Image (spheres, grey):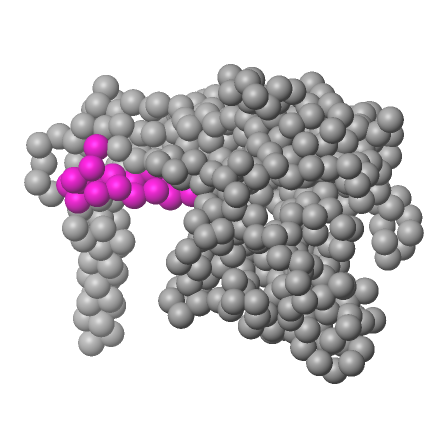
Amino acid sequence: MKNTILLLLLILGLFACKDDDAFFDASIPRENIRFEPVQGGAIMRYTLPENTDIFAVRAEYKDYKGEKMVKVASFAHDSLVIDGFNEARNGVPVRISLLNQRSEESKAMDMTFNTENSSAVAFFEHIEVLPYWDGFQIKYDVPTGAAGLCNVFFLGTNPVTQELDTLLLETFSIVSGENVKYFNLTQVREANTVVVKTEDLRGNVAKQKVYEGITCYMTEKLEPSGFEWLDPFALSIEDDNPDYRLGWKYLFDGDVKGNRKFEPGMLTGTITKDMYTFIAGPFAVNTPEDPKYFILDIKEAKQVARFQMYALLYGSPSLEPSYFASMYINDLPNWVTVYASNDKEDEDSWEEIGNFYESPAVAVPWAQRALDVDSEYYIRTVEDLNAADPCYFKLQFSAENPPYRYFKIEFNGVFKEFKNWAWAANTEEYVTLHELEVYVKQE
């Protein structure tokens, strides 16, 4: 009896071994496989033999960190993407096998492949960190198919420890093509140390580089008392009567938050209607079919670094005047183009020098803290108003531009129907700004 049991166990063990060692009897000729290096990996292209039992192709290899990677592609395809690399590598081993529908694997075949630099590494092949107004700029040109993130730091004073530290400025997605990023620093120095660090799609650091001694071009706000706002299409609403206070002069009165409008009401507990602001319309938005623009004359040619365009902060509601009865943000620009010239009468002399665009459907618009937009930012006291940061966007200009006197400003779009609230839609395309500041090269 004992011998019979042992014999049965031996037979079962042999069958078990046979199941464990089961494999798929198929192969693929080496000449049917080729590898094409690409950014961060390779594409394995293959031609399968006429074998109806082949269900998938399997590739096993190790990524740049030495971690095991397995990629499987269906028999219906003719290629498989191999990724997981940053720096370019040659002769990376890979084991290739075939699978049937029962996931049984054929005998593996050993091959090698080469990779190219990932876009997070190739980013550094065509990058320039250059001087800029109150900071620096980064120019880069990345091939098609870019992916990954770029982190930009500068060496500055940590506001918490008050010690020298590497401070993060921005993290942005690497996109294909020629691009430029401008960085204006609050800690202005004659020269900056900039650290650029890229990450792959898995969050791993791909490469880091330090750029030292980047010159900073100092700027200053130009005194606006002599500015003139030319209005060729008579669009600016000029009404300085009580309950209105509208006109282009309020673009240059130095009130970037709305203190003139809100302070009297905050002190007396009433709602004031006076706006002390600029609004143009109806139909002040520029279109190719119906061009509209304004011209800013700063009276003397200057090397201009940037414009800063402001909105009223969130104080008392803007139910009056009627131009503001809709949601205030719907009158604010989301798309502005600026041209410059030293001869405003010569149409051929205008050069485009700057452009700002933000999608009207963006989740967090530049005007998030502006009047009527988000009650979280509602300001009730003069003290809070004075402590609040202004709400604005920048139009950045090249440091290589010559001095200009005249600036043609096109408002190409407004938010118009923010959050799809049709009841508050700016159907007549009014355009408003609260303040416009001009920053020029420091003399």
Left or right relative to 400: residue 43: left
**Residue at image coords 74%, 76%:** 265
Give the magenta part as a residue range.
54-78
Residue 386, given in percent of the width and then of the height, sits at 81, 64
Relative vertical location of residue 185 with respect to residue 123 in this rendering, above or below: below
- Left-right relation of 104 to 327: left
Query: Percent x, y for residue 411?
Result: 51, 42
Q: Quadrant of residue 257?
A: bottom right
- Residue at 21% in and 23% down: 32
Q: On the rendered image, what quadrant is the C terminus found in?
A: top right
At x 22%, y 55%, the residue is: 19
Residue 98 image position (x, y, % from top left): 23, 39
Given residues 106 and 293, the one toward you in this image is: 293
Q: Based on the picture, tell me whether residue 408 belongs to the magenta stretch.
A: no
Relative to 260, say whether 198 is above or below: above
Q: Residue furthest front?
A: 241
Report x, y in % for residue 218. 82, 31
Q: Can you see residue 133?
A: no
